[in-house]
Image (tube, rainbow, N blue to C red):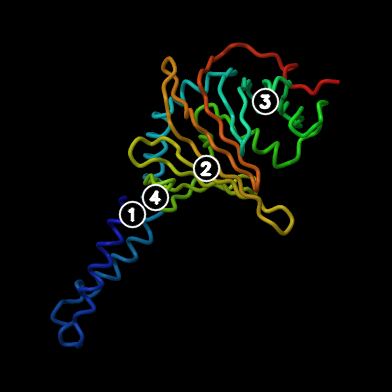
Amino acid sequence: MKIKRLLVIAYEKFLIFKGFRTMEQKQKMGRFECAMPRLLFIFALLWTPLLQAQDIEGIMKDHYSACKQDFWDQVQTVNIKGIWLRDQEKANFELLAKKPGKIMIRGRWQVEPYAESFDGSSGWTIAPWTGVKTPQLMLAKEQLLLQSVFDFGSPIPRDVALEYRGEGDAFGIPCYRLVAIVDGVEYEYFVDEEDFYLRRMDRRELIGNQTQIMTKRYDQYRKFGGVVIPTLVIVQVEDLKKEYVFDDIIVGDGISNLTFRRPE
């Protein structure tokens, strides 16, 4: 990154300056040369925010291009089929998502129908593995996990203020680390340095005296008719963890809002 190179240069000049121990030696350098390390340091401080903004802009431009965000901005609904896994359990699923913020996952678990849904304001579930076969309100962590399963392209809003936190590692992949604060909630994004796909997202929210952490892993990106999505998604909220494998996707299938509502 430009910032790192600039700071390295400033530090090297500072080391050179430190090598001149006596006033006589320093005077021989000339006033300008003596002041050079300090000037470089001040220059770095003044320019770091600007260079950081330029670097973030470049990263996000490549990221949105990689995930075809211009296309996803026009998409209103998706229908995805696949398999979810949790501990020793697994089941086929159909995922329905509609903007803004509606999502449902449904299918059969050991021949029994199940469903998890968020209608934009509240979440409900039918979970036969718990012994209950009637609709129940979701726990907060269950709702957060469900809402995090699918993104229409990138989960990073175009208008959010981002801070560059340097380079990091996401499941063994070198990434750029970007952080945003939205309504008091911290989001940390790990963007692949090579292909600019999102590899990890961490969400941290202070609830009472405890910090709730949600981690999402994005992997195995594939193209479906020109649409690029991660076909392996792993989401964990506290002790709740689920893995989703996407096998097929239909874009713009048309889904009614009534689909997501809790049955009476």
Q: CA distance from mark 2 to mark 1?
A: 24 Å
Q: Which residue is mark 4?
A: 52
Label 4 vs label 1: CA separation? Answer: 7 Å
In terms of sequence position, does the residue under pointer 3 or pointer 1 come before the other? 1
Residue 179, x across and y down, in percent? 51, 48
Left or right, 23 with reference to 136: left
Task: Compare marks 4 and 3 and give the one earlier in the sequence.
Answer: 4
Question: Residues at badges 2 and 1 in contact (C-beta under 8 Å)?
Answer: no
Residue sitting farthest toward the right: 264
Residue drawn at point x = 71 percent, y = 28 percent: 116
Identify the residue at horizontal 15%, vertical 77% (top origin). Answer: 29
**Counting residues from the N terminus, which is met first, the one under dot 2 or under dot 4?**
4
> What amino acid is at disc 3?
Lys
Judging by the rendered image, the residue that carries numbered circle 2 is: 201
Residue extending furthest left? 28
Name which residue lies at 39% across and 47% down: 172
Category of crowding for the residue at label 3, using alpha-carbon neighbours closer than 10 angstroms: few (below 14), some (14–19), many (at least 20)? many
- The picture places residue 140, in percent across and down from the top left corner, at 73, 41
Is there a contact, CB below 8 Å, between mark 4 and mark 1?
Answer: yes
Please name the residue that numbered disc 3 is placed on.
102
Q: Residues within 10 Å of mark 2 (few under 14, many from 20)?
A: many
Q: Amino acid at mark 1?
A: Ile
Q: Which residue is mark 1?
A: 3
Residue 228 in which image quadrant: top left
Give the CA separation, mark 4 to mark 3.
35 Å
Cα separation between marks 2 and 3: 20 Å
Query: Which residue is at 70% across, 38% downward?
Result: 142
Residue 197 x %, y %: 41, 35
